[in-house]
Image (cartoon, helix red, strand yellow):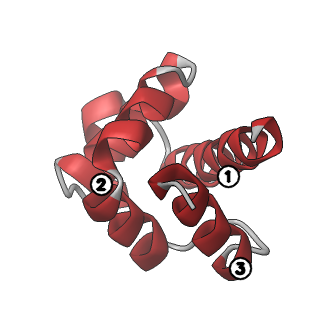
Amino acid sequence: MTIRGEVIGNMNRSWGTVPNESELKRMIEQYSDSLLVMIMSLPSKYREVILLYYYQELKIREIAVVLQLKESTVSVRLKRAREKLRIQWEGVDEDE
């Protein structure tokens, strides 16, 4: 099995739903190159919250201040960004 196949298999087993923060952080650490490509392909409004939250380790309220958004908007964007990343990973799995 390829590394990519193993990654996808692990994700499919553990991610029946939108990944939570700890799962996404673990994935970033283990599969940072592939994930970074996917993050960079996200629309900017999702990409920026993912980068600020996971790479800069800002809290939601801090991101809200930086981006001049409501905290609820940041939370929704994070949730949608995670969902888009999950869908992208599933798409990679279907290509194999």
**Residue 39, numbered label:** none
**Residue 13, numbered label:** 3
For the residues labelled 2 and 1, the Cα–Cα distance comes to 16 Å
x, y (%) of residue 91? 77, 39
Q: Secondary structure at mark 1?
A: helix
Mark 2 vs mark 1, foreground winner is: 1
Q: Residue 14 sits in which quadrant?
A: bottom right
Q: Is residue 72 above or below residue 16?
A: above
For the residues labelled 3 and 1, the Cα–Cα distance comes to 12 Å
Give whichever of discs 3 and 1 has the lower sequence position.
Answer: 3
Indicate the amino acid at tag 2: Tyr
Q: Secondary structure at mark 3?
A: helix
Q: Which residue is mark 1?
A: 86
Which residue shows up at 63% across the image and 55% down it? 79
Please report contact status of discs 3 and 2: CB closer than 8 Å, yes or no.
no
Q: Residues within 10 Å of mark 3 (few under 14, many from 20)?
A: few
Which residue shows up at 69% across the image and 73% down it? 15
Is residue 19 something one can see in this rendering?
Answer: no
Q: Which of the pair 95/67 is nearer the observer?
A: 95
x, y (%) of residue 39? 45, 33
Q: Is residue 5 above or below residue 39?
A: below
Q: Which of the pair 12/48 is nearer the observer?
A: 12
Q: Residue 28 sits in which quadrant?
A: bottom left
The N terminus is located in which quarter?
Answer: bottom right
Q: Residues within 10 Å of mark 1 (few under 14, many from 20)?
A: many
Q: Residues within 10 Å of mark 2 (few under 14, many from 20)?
A: some
Indicate the amino acid at tag 3: Arg
Q: Is residue 94 above or below residue 26?
A: above
Which residue shows up at 52% across the image and 51% down it? 4
Q: Which residue is mark 2?
A: 54
Indicate the amino acid at tag 1: Arg
For the residues labelled 3 and 2, the Cα–Cα distance comes to 23 Å
